[in-house]
Image (cartoon, rainbow, N blue to C red):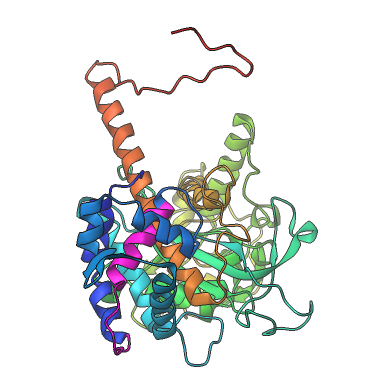
Amino acid sequence: MSVPLKVIEDIIDASGIAPVIEDMLPAGVRGRQLSARTLFTGMMAALADGRPAHLTRVLQALITLPGADQRRLGVVTARQDGPHQLTYRQVEHTFRLITRALSKTQPDGAPSDQLQRACDQLLEASIPGRVKAASTSLAADWTDVEAWARPVTHNAAGTGADPEAAWGHRNVNLKIARGEMFYGYYYSAVTMVNDENGPAVPELTRRITITSCAADPAAALASVLTSMPAAGLALGDILADSGYSHRIPATWASPLRAAGASLVVDLHPSDRGPRGTHEGAIIASGNLYCPCTPAGLLQLVPLPPGAGAADVAVHDQQTAELARYKLGLHTAEDADGYRRHACPATAGKLRCPLRPASMTLSRDRPEILAPPGHPPACCTRQTITAGPQIAEKTRQKHHYPSAAWRQSYRRRTAAERLNAIKDTATTSIGRGWIRLTGLTPLMLSLTCLTAVRNQRILNAFDNRQGDSTQRAAGQPPKTRSRRRREPAGATPAPP
């Protein structure tokens, strides 16, 4: 077992979900041999060994424990006719009771409040206290999870053996136009990343949620994130791709800002560039710009992956020049989302004849050679007020797509590495990984898998930190023994 049994039991006990779920289960005439705590222990033990999330594998993980652990966990109990070992029917019965208690009365493709709360507590318990406050930044992403059931027809939603599953779209490393359809669920997760200019942290998964493909995964994840401050977890930077930022503001950007988060997102191509005006100022890529901003600068887009050093230098020079035309933030955003902006000439970022004081600035700043004949409000007033609806979808922490934004957004690759759980070389969550239908069994199994993965990530991070410390002290890193593999067809050496 790659994760010790004591670590698994400590996670379950720290989460406190086992006694809560036990109170939700109906009392039978004869007491159950398998408790909720032991069932979760078996699920995590099976997944820690790289086994699929089958109940037969859960039973196998429990009955192969040492005898003392089996008696302590209730896998083997004493009866009048002798010791009795746990059976598959008992595992199936307890899991069915837990699934029924945590499911909604009317399934709608989203987890119940009890299920989401239990999964949140289990994942939070898998993160040790020494790293809980190491960072407040999170990287978000979602991926596809195929259902075990198959639909009756391609166009029928809510039919077949799994009525909560639906048809969804996945890219499979291709362009969106060349993607493919799948039948199942969306698995959304947020991963810890280091704060800007902060120390490295282990990329532990802090929250997950499962939704039907008929629901919006961004809105479902936003509701999970906005509940974290109530649990004492402050929200810092939230890094997400254009799949999240392109959603309507009411389902993603606005609730996260209200919860205290700072967005660092990539913009969808249809959200980039000029998108109207406000008091004469140009609204572009989430910012307000001078009406005399060169049109070419307003069309800047992020650098493609693998850009050369010369291209990076040119791009950074252009984004720095664009930032000089951006209206400065005169006052911070108030509780209602209103903020005041000042002309860049009054802020000393450029020279403009409409602001005589700015013409005394040095000539290394851009100069407005043809100011508007009828100056708008942004050119005549000291400040203008922008409400929360101005650039509500695209407004973010850094000037897009500047070098500061690029460096900050680069941390989002941690969310992509979480998708390694779909790799067939490790624990693949492809179709057949779990042979149960419904959202609740899938989410419970994925939560246990993610909690186990957190322990592996933490151990690998601690080993790298230890090696780095030894190198800094001038000592060679500790070597790890590797099993020698004989080449194919080699004759074994005689004894």
Q: Position of residue 68 (x, y in %)?
A: 20, 53
Point out the image quarter for the C terminus. top left
The x, y position of residue 371, in whole percent, is 63, 63
The stretch of residues the image draws in magenta is 25-47
Closer to us: 35 or 185: 35
* Residue 484: percent from left, percent from top: 46, 19
**Side of 149 where 107 appears, left or right:** left
Judging depth in this view, the residue of 226 and 274 nearest the camera is 226
Number of numbered callouts drawn: 0
Residue 416 locus on image (x, y percent): 53, 51
The answer to if 36 sits in the magenta stretch is yes
Q: Is residue 161 visible?
A: yes
Q: Residue at x 60, y 13 (%)?
A: 490
Residue 227 visible in the shown view:
no
**Which is nearer the eye, 170 or 79?**
79
Q: 214 above or below 325?
A: below
- Residue shown at 42% from the left, 48% from the top: 49
Residue 341, quarter of the rendered image? bottom left
Is 297 one of the magenta-colored residues? no
Residue farthest toward the top in the current orientation of the protein: 494
**Residue drawn at x 60%, y 45% as measured from the top left:** 318
Horizontal side of 250 relative to 155 (left or right) equals left
Please identify the quadrant where the N terminus is shown: top left
When asked about the image quadrant of residue 260, the answer is bottom left
In the picture, measured across the screen, residue 270 lies left or right of residue 487, that is right
Quick one: which residue is furthest to the front in this view? 81
